[in-house]
Image: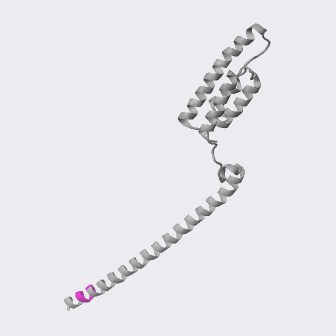
Amino acid sequence: MKKDEAILELNRQIDRLNDKNYPKNDAWTNKTATLIRKYFGEDSEQYKFLSDFKFLTGFITPDTKQQIIDRNKGRAVQYLKDCIEFIEKYGLYKRPRKNILSTIGNEWLVAILIPIAGALYGLGFSNGTHSNDVQNYELRQTVKSQHDTISKYKTIIDTLTVRKLK
């Protein structure tokens, strides 16, 4: 639904209020409530306000009936003008898109995520262990190489010391 179409529909509702032949009763309220829910969403302040709106409540005398209708008509027209202004300024309500996670129940999410978390932990542990083993092997090779070098120097030093003593 486009913004212009929504504004046109709300203006038609205002025109219906001003039409003397159109009944001012719950039919108008229900039609308007349907439009407001469509344009603003069920949780909007606009829809909550209109859900409690009634032209006539309880038993009234014919003398006061027209006064109540006129007073409520003014409120309804102003309300619809405010809604039109809101749509012009901010646009229409867009329902949130559902993704795969919003359609799956929590029980299924837990059942899916626990094995995934376990697998990731296992991969990380395995990778860390392998990396640590490689580093330990390299360190042992370095120590062995340095030990061999020290042994060679020790042999050379011992040989030189023996020659000096002779």
Give the tally of numbered discs: 0
Image position, residue 32 (x, y; %):
70, 29
Q: Is residue 39 above or below residue 161?
A: above
Residue 92 in view? no
Q: In terms of image quadrants, where is residue 25?
A: top right
At horizontal 72% and vertical 12% (from top left) the residue drawn is 66
Q: Is residue 120 above or below residue 18?
A: below
Magenta stretch: residue 39 in it?
no
Which stretch did the figure color magenta? 157-161
Q: Quick one: quadrant of the N terminus?
A: top right
At horizontal 37% and vertical 81% (from top left) the residue drawn is 145
At horizontal 60% and vertical 64% (from top left) the residue drawn is 122
Instruction: Name the chief secondary structure element in magenta.
Output: helix
Magenta stretch: residue 158 in it?
yes
Between 118 and 14, the one lying in front of the other is: 14
Between 33 and 140, the one lying in front of the other is: 33
Between 119 and 11, the one lying in front of the other is: 11
Image position, residue 147 (x, y; %):
36, 80
Image position, residue 90 (x, y; %):
54, 36
At horizontal 71% and vertical 33% (from top left) the residue drawn is 34
Between 109 and 47, the one lying in front of the other is: 47
Image position, residue 129 (x, y; %):
53, 69
Residue 5 in view? yes
